[in-house]
């Protein structure tokens, strides 16, 4: 009955490779997010989708491309991985803008630790 | 430009005592504040939230206080339990202007000693 799930949990890869991280939520939420937690432990938003539409796109290299096949899934594809991409990536979801009081309360997945060698 | 700050990287308290975690913010457009708890190798878990129209919200052992004039909020845990040991993140959003975008603080590691 996992609410927000991510795969894989750990990902170790060589510089220059292309990799994907998958996220799924079964909460019926309209909005999904990708966050990056860097070595200083800051959680910073990267992208957000609402009903498969991109609504937040922070200053992230073009090598990062989110894809939302449906509102329950938001995958993150990373091209030409670099050493600085090593971090923990968290997926999250929240009820959409029409839900009023729930706006802003986000529920997180367990994270994917990406290590680029 | 860090808009949400948690100036104490760590806090250690005895079991049964009160834990007070602090958070300061600079953006006056923030109107919704949340606290998340994070255990190692897990994602952040939503704990409690408060809207800017309130100054206090209580849920069991957890109480969040908001002082808008000081742009300061705090999380009180009483009584503290060893299972409360985790990293606590403060987060804020400006719902009218930025929707559901959350800005996080850097976290405070709470250790509750038996």
Image: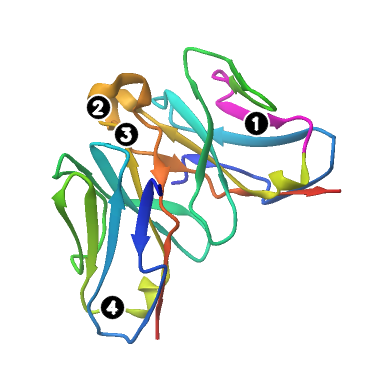
- Rounded to the nearest whole Å, what is the CA distance between mark 4 and mark 3? 29 Å
Dot 1 falls on a residue whose secondary structure is strand
Residues marked 4 and 1, same chain:
no
The residue to which callout 3 is attached is B100
Residue closest to the eye, A101 or B104: A101
Q: Residue at x 68, y 37 (%)?
A: B21
Instruction: Tell me, yes or no, whether the two marked residues, 2 and 4, touch with CB atoms within 8 Å.
Output: no
User: Where residue A82 appears, x then y in whole percent?
Assistant: 32, 79
Q: Is residue A4 magenta?
A: no
Dot 4 falls on a residue whose secondary structure is loop
- Rounded to the nearest whole Å, what is the CA distance between mark 2 and mark 4? 34 Å
Relative side of B20 to B56, left or right = right
Chain holding disc 1: B
| Quadrant of the rendered image containing residue B99 | top left
Q: Residue at x 36, y 55 (%)?
A: A5
N-terminal label among 2 and 4: 4
Q: Which residues are magenta?
A: B67-80
Q: Residue at x 50, y 40 (%)?
A: B4
The residue to which callout 1 is attached is B75
Residues marked 3 and 2, same chain:
no
Chain holding disc 4: A
| Quadrant of the rendered image containing residue B57 | top right
- Rounded to the nearest whole Å, what is the CA distance between mark 4 and mark 1? 39 Å
Q: Which mark is residue A97?
A: 2
N-terminal label among 1 and 3: 1
């Amino acid at each position: 009955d996992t609410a927000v799930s991510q795969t894989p949990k750990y990902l170790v890869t060589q510089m220059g490779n292309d990799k994907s991280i998958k996220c799924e939520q079964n909460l019926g939420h309209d909005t999904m997010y990708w966050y990056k937690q860097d070595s200083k432990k800051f959680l910073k938003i990267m992208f957000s989708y609402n009903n498969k539409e991109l609504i937040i796109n922070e200053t992230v290299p073009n090598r990062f491309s989110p894809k939302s096949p449906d509102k329950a899934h938001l995958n993150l594809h990373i091209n030409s991985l670099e050493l600085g991409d090593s971090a923990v990536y968290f997926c999250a979801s929240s009820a959409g803008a029409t839900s009023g009081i729930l706006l802003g309360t986000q529920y997180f997945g367990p994270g994917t630790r990406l290590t680029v060698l | 430009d860090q808009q949400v700050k948690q100036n104490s990287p760590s806090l250690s308290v005895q079991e049964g005592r009160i834990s007070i975690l602090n958070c300061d913010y600079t953006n006056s457009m923030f109107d919704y504040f949340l606290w998340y708890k994070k255990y190692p190798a897990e994602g952040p878990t939503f704990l409690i939230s408060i809207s800017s129209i309130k100054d206090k919200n209580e849920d069991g052992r957890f109480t969040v206080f908001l002082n808008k004039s000081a742009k300061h909020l705090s999380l009180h845990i009483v009584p503290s339990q060893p299972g409360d040991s985790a990293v606590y993140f403060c987060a804020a959003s400006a719902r009218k202007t930025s929707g559901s975008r959350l800005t996080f603080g850097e976290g405070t590691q709470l250790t509750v000693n038996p």
